[in-house]
Image (cartoon, helix red, strand yellow):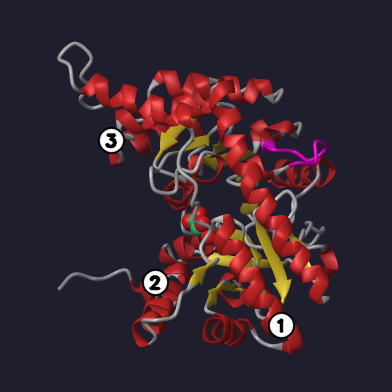
Amino acid sequence: MPKLNENYLNLKASYLFSEIAHRVAAYSEAHPDQKIIRLGIGDVTLPLGASVIKGLHEGVDAMASKETFKGYGPEQGYEFVRDAIVDYYARNGITIHAKEIFISDGAKSDTGNITDLFDRDNVVLIPDPVYPVYVDTNTMNGRNITYINATAENNFLPMPDENLAVDIIYICSPNNPTGAAYNKEQLKVWVDYALKNNAVLLYDSAYECFITDPTLPRSIFEIEGARKCAIEFCSLSKTAGFTGTRCGYTIVPTELEFTASTGAVMNLNAMWNRRQSTKFNGVSYIVQSGAAAAFTEEGMADCKKNIAYYQENAKLLADLMTRKGIRYYGGVNSPYIWLECPNGMESWEFFDYLLNNAQVVGTPGAGFGNNGKYFFRLTSFGSREATLEAIERLEKLL
Ligand code: MLT
């Protein structure tokens, strides 16, 4: 009999968004005439931009002819996409090198897979509430998790104190689910903590494209010292509408290294390269062709139009909260509205209340951690029509 990974016994029965989908499907089956508006999972609704479509078509055409056909590509991603990302960062004043960029099918996979590089005996610091992938993947590995509270009192931006003793730190900014975004001074404190304590920062910047405040950092590599302690994960899911197309990237600086128990120096870029080339065969050429187009100036201009549309949705939802006197966070520099459930309701109770009475789906804060128990997340990624209809229904209900 195989000995199973019993850490799976410590997981919730299903992943948060699978659980929501299941509950919504059950409601829909019982009420086939009701029109449900889904503002739960942060899934985009606008079609891909014209530049990306052109890039995808070019990718398809390349596969159609003997001269340009591609078989296996480099596991790290094609040079042309990595170079396009180098340029994208350079336009934002950040220097990274192509060999530090690894193309993948998205930040969800990479933030989970990165745990391969670390021993089980690490103390992992995860904010509560948080994107559930960080918690679930470390639980699968049987790792010790320490939580740091993100609450209204610290504006959902927890900071390290002198008693903190951890090895691996997850930061997501702008944050999923709360929408809170760290400023440069705050991130500098985290980088200094990591450098001083020989810790590594795993920085998820999947929502960087929603930052409108020019003083806020869009990458951990805007912070001095980060190249020696941080890995950045990003995705085209929200930036370019790739939730279904799938493409993301991870940046592992070549300076990032730690000394092993044997005294050998282990380089995380080399380790990640080894891991990816062993376990991953890369993203399809066609998708990478579309992704490279997204990073051009023209491609980004298309992406920004779609992002502006979602930002307007976020504003419309935020205005509703203001009119209703409901305390909320996010909505600017973020596609998410993180609101306090009205009348002291708990988040799953509020989820059922909205589903049953307005047929609007959101995400219960409890799914992101204990500190989300009385909070609820709405996404701005719906269509304008759906968002406006949800607002009309909630206007009457709340
Ligand atoms: C979310 O709704 O939190 C995200 O869309 C999920 C994801 O990025 O995997």
Marks 3, 2: nearer the viewer = 3
The first of marks 3 and 2 along the sequence is: 2
Residue at the spot 75% in from the left edge and 43% down from the top edge: 196
- Residues at marks 1 and 2, CA–CA distance in whole angstroms: 41 Å
Residue at the spot 54% in from the left edge and 46% down from the top edge: 238
Q: Which residue is mark 3?
A: 281
Residue type at mark 1: give it: Leu
**Dominant secondary-structure state across the stretch colored magenta:** loop
Q: Is residue 257 above or below residue 156?
A: above
Q: Is residue 111 above or below residue 291?
A: below
Pointers 1 and 3 in contact (C-beta within 8 Å) = no
- Residues at marks 3 and 2, CA–CA distance in whole angstroms: 28 Å
Quadrant in the rendering for residue 347: bottom right
Q: Position of residue 199 (x, y in %)?
A: 65, 47
Secondary element type, mark 2: helix
Disc 2 packing (10 Å; few <14; some 14–19; many ≥20)? some
Q: Nearer the viewer, residue 251 or 380?
A: 380
Residue 19 appearing in the image: yes
Residue type at mark 3: give it: Asn
Secondary element type, mark 1: loop
The first of marks 1 and 2 along the sequence is: 2
Q: Which residue is mark 2?
A: 7
Q: Quadrant of the N terminus?
A: bottom left
Q: Which residue is mark 1?
A: 398
Residue 112 placement, left or right of 74:
right
Q: Position of residue 352 (x, y in %)?
A: 54, 85
Q: Quadrant of the C terminus?
A: bottom right
Marks 1, 2: nearer the viewer = 1
- Residues at marks 1 and 3, CA–CA distance in whole angstroms: 50 Å
Q: Nearer the viewer, residue 180 or 65?
A: 65
Give the residues drawn in magenta, as a range: 212-220
